[in-house]
Image: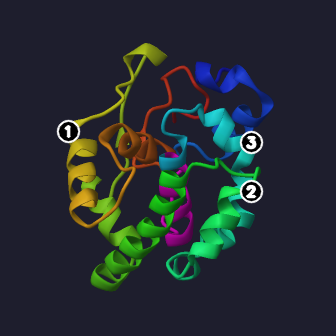
Amino acid sequence: MTRCEWANASPLEQAYHDDEWGVPVHDDRLLFEFLILEGAQAGLSWATILKKREGYRQAFDNFDANKMAQYSDDKIAELLSNPAIVRNQLKIKSAINNAKAFLAVQAEFGQFDTYIWRFVSGETQHNAWQDLLEIPTRTPKSDKMSKELKKRGFNFVGTTICYAFMQAVGMVNDHTVDCFKYK
């Protein structure tokens, strides 16, 4: 079975590729999880974040934005000492800030899903890449998403992070054409 080349790096990445990457997500909690994890990945490998994903779920109350928005300085100190996550103060504070911004978007649009999927008109954009090297790290749509999320108060949502988020949650299909998941 042929997979996207990056998925062959480890069994964890293979399972993530086969079961999640590029599958359209419309659940607000899971969309929020991916947004936080993609931001946490900045400067690191996705494999590092995948290995710490369960640690993140436990540390961040299963990405419950309502709970995260209420985190205190004591909770931040606890998170900074937690080896199950990336212990970066800026990224931890960003996750808490993003929970607040996420809740504001939900209040305005009813669901974060309604807001975020409008960047692709509610439909997965299907690309036809022959090779991993053809896949962009950003697009005009991720540029727009990044700009709008920043205006709404989100952090760690640069255009490259937004494009990785779009790939992860199935807003774009960037499986290479020879990958069994492409269709």
Q: Amino acid at mark 3?
A: Lys
Q: Earlier in the sequence, mark 3 or mark 1?
A: 3
Name the magenta segment's main secondary structure: helix
Who's the residue at 68% across and 45% down the image?
Answer: 19
Estimate the spatial distance between the alpha carbons at disc 3 and disc 1, rounded to whole Å.
Answer: 31 Å
Helix or strand or loop: what does disc 3 sit on?
Answer: helix
Observer-side mark, 2 or 1, equals: 2
Q: Which mark is residue 82?
A: 2
Q: Quadrant of residue 6?
A: top right
Q: Earlier in the sequence, mark 2 or mark 1?
A: 2
Q: Earlier in the sequence, mark 2 or mark 3?
A: 3
Verify whether residue 29 appears in magenta: yes
Q: Quadrant of residue 5?
A: top right
Q: Which residues are magenta?
A: 23-38
The 10 Å Cα crowd at callout 2, few under 14, some 14 to 19, many 20 or more, is some
Left or right relative to 89: residue 133: left
Who's the residue at 64% across and 73% down the image?
Answer: 75
Estimate the spatial distance between the alpha carbons at disc 2 and disc 1, rounded to whole Å.
Answer: 37 Å
Residue occupied by mark 1:
140
Helix or strand or loop: what does disc 1 sit on?
Answer: helix
> In the rendered image of this protein, does residue 61 appear above or below residue 49?
below
Residue occupied by mark 3:
51
Q: Which mark is residue 176?
A: none
Left or right relative to 1: residue 130: left
Q: Decide which of 130, 110 is in the foreground and name it.
A: 110
